[in-house]
Image (tube, rainbow, N blue to C red):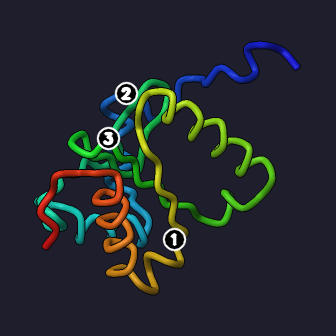
Amino acid sequence: MRPEADTPRPPRGSTTGQRRALRRSQTDAERRLWYLLRARQPGALKFRRQHAVGPYVLDFYSFEAHLAVELDGSPHGEPEGVARDERRTRYLVQQGIRVLRFSDGDVLRMPESVVEAILVAVSAEGGSRTLT
């Protein structure tokens, strides 16, 4: 295997315009979770959508909690998608970012449970947030 094979490549969504386009073309699951995460609603955490970290664009990111929330659709379950997600997670952990992954189906079927899992992860990590 080539050494550069493990080096992340810049994402297609790395420019401001491309991140804006990703925000405009959200999946139903992203739209549903964003409605619940925006405006510091859960536990007073602030999240950003389609936030660039190094060569990756994260679905949702909280600077305060150093937490990425990634939503996985069907391509993520395929072997190539799983390998790509593992590389991405390794990179983010090296940057000091915790990563939570949820399937699109989980978000659409039980969005409040997903938000609760995010809050539990933050409080378990010793976050000083007041959970509401």
- Distance (Cα) linking label 2 and label 3: 22 Å
Residue 61 place in picture, x, y as percent: 32, 46
- Distance (Cα) linking label 1 and label 3: 22 Å
Residue at mark 1:
104
Residue type of the residue flagged with mark 2: Thr
Residue at mark 3:
66
- Distance (Cα) linking label 1 and label 2: 25 Å
Comparing labels 1 and 2, the label whose residue is closer to the camera: 1
Q: What label sits on residue 15 in the rendered view?
A: 2
Between 124 and 31, the one lying in front of the other is 124
Residue at the spot x=56%, y=61% of the render?
A: 72
Between 88 and 43, the one lying in front of the other is 43
Residue type of the residue flagged with mark 3: His
Residue type of the residue flagged with mark 1: Asp
Which residue ends up furthest to the bottom in the rendered image? 109
Secondary-structure class at tag 3: loop
